[in-house]
Amino acid sequence: MSDQVAATPHLDALIIGAGFSGMYQLHCLRDRLGLSARVLEAADGVGGTWYWNRYPGARCDSESHSYSYYFSDELLEEWEWSERYPGQAEIMRYLNHVADKFDLKRDIQLGTRVSAARYDEAANLWHVETESGAGYSATYLITAVGCLSSANVPDIPGLDSFAGQWVHTGQWPHEGVDFTRKRVGQVGTGSTGIQAAPVIAETAGHLTVFQRTANYSVPARNAPLTEEFKRWCHEEHDEIRAVLQDTPNGHPFRIADRKVFDVSASERQEIYEKAWEKGGLQFRASFQDLLADKAANDTAAEFLKGKIREVIKDPETAAMLADIDHPYAAKRPPIDTGYFEAFNRDNVSLVDVRKNPIERITPKGIVTADGVEHELDVIVFATGFDAMTGALLKLGVTGRDGQSLADAWYAGPVTYLGLQSAGFPNMFTITGPGSPSVLCNMPVPIEQHVEWITDCIAHMRANGIARIEPEAEAADRWVAHVNEAANATLLPLAKHSWYLGANVPGKPRVFMPYAGGMKRYRDICDDIAAKGYEGFVLDGAAGDATAGDFAAADSADSPGI
């Protein structure tokens, strides 16, 4: 709480969240435009999702040299990552370094959770309240709360009765959790669960993994970075930046210019083997049509299922882990360090809760539909997040005419470019639903969003424009285009994907991120700005967005590759 700053009655801009997004937005508005700006952050430190997600094995699945800000050459040259895939602690050191380097903490108010934000049309101001009762007003409201920051704790009967300890990976205790010789149950096998399970198994007396949805995973092959590679990163950051900004997913590698059936079966097998040995998300770049053609995807899926069967010694466990019901990379594609190998340990077992769902939790543990009570000392929920919309809706946002954001999005989020929603003037969202966000290496869309918002506010101030919001029709057309882009891929085929909100009971099933590719999205945003913010209403002057504004996504620029 030492970074707490005194309240200011009015600000040019109020930013909610002090992760990658909020810190860069503060830097841009305060230091580039000279605006009065402040960040309100619920945590007691900067870092955003990395402040909370400190579970065992927490590690980025983007390569470290790409999981960085690229707005500052000086920052790139002075920071060195230690591993191919940075762990949570190293990412926190990096973000604190950035905050200190640019003197951001003096305008970041920690331990401050926003409880309501209301638009005052007469004054053209946003009034923001916090749980402590403090109030602020600002001309511009920017939400930087993150796509994966609202923990999804499943509503299982009896949870309150559990006599042991339960934790969620997205709200991990800072003092840690001691698993030594304890009976641990882990619920969930997405990216987080795949990272956590091998590490928990190292000290637990016994680990029981409760799997609803079997998942693919490619070895991360994580290792310390060589001095040669570090030198290359310093010398070639212009080229690395160019690749990051020119690829559909903002990763530091290009997609192979070939399709699955352009090569023979033996060549294809060799390509997959080399990609498996190299490890990491680059496996997806082996062919350009993996997310566009089901038959092509089946070849990758069968290869990966074959690897699972090779690794797992017990045939029954191998069959459960390889019983995957969705195309490869139609859900977030995990990478791992020893995940499947962990099931060869004597102290690890697997429960198929698709076959035997969890019915209730008792004081002693978890009871499944077959009547078996799995006795546990600790339950770990690796059940993900109310992704993309959960944290936004918890802010209690009310726009023009008293309409809440929750009501405006009752059937699913409706945004223009993922940046704004009709009826909420001067409110911007960084990496919101309708933007590429979670389909990318996150710092890339974050930087693009922040710079676009900064340029937009600069344009408004230079031209005497008091407010900006989308035309409702433009937002509707954008949502239709988001669906069109998703339907050009295999992504909607994953029934339980959080991209669709399917992991949260009662949440509208709407495909939320933009699957047309980061490069295409950047071009669309730049074009709209160049045309005088087409599709937006600027202080009463309507833009002229047309139904033909957005080119349909083609398979060559689809995500997950």
Image (tube, rainbow, N blue to C red):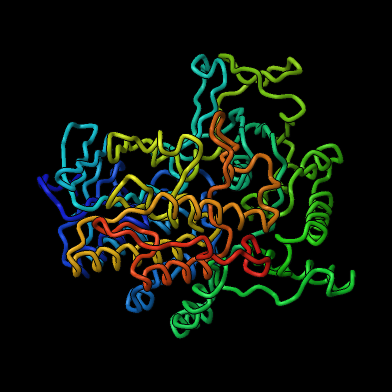
Q: Looking at the figure, which quarter contains the C terminus?
A: bottom right
Question: Looking at the picture, does residue 144 appear above or below residue 541?
Answer: above
The x, y position of residue 494, in whole percent, is 69, 45
Q: Residue at x 51, y 49 (%)?
A: 58
Q: Nearer the viewer, residue 305 or 504?
A: 504
Q: Looking at the figure, which quarter contains the N terminus?
A: top left
Residue 196 visible in the displayed image: no
The x, y position of residue 163, in whole percent, is 51, 16
- Residue 283 is left or right of residue 380, and the answer is right
Question: Looking at the picture, does residue 298 appear above or below residue 112?
Answer: below
The x, y position of residue 33, in whole percent, is 20, 68
Q: Nearer the viewer, residue 522 or 496?
A: 522
Q: Quadrant of residue 540?
A: bottom left
Question: Looking at the picture, does residue 243 appear above or below residue 440?
Answer: below
Residue 190 visible in the displayed image: yes
In the displayed orientation, state which residue is furthest to the bottom.
235
- Residue 144 is left or right of residue 1, and the answer is right
Q: Residue at x 83, y 74 (%)?
A: 262
The x, y position of residue 387, in whole percent, is 50, 43
Q: Nearer the viewer, residue 169 or 262?
A: 262
Q: Nearer the viewer, residue 354 or 413?
A: 413
Q: Quadrant of residue 530?
A: bottom left
Q: Quadrant of residue 136?
A: top left
Q: Residue at x 30, y 37 (%)?
A: 398
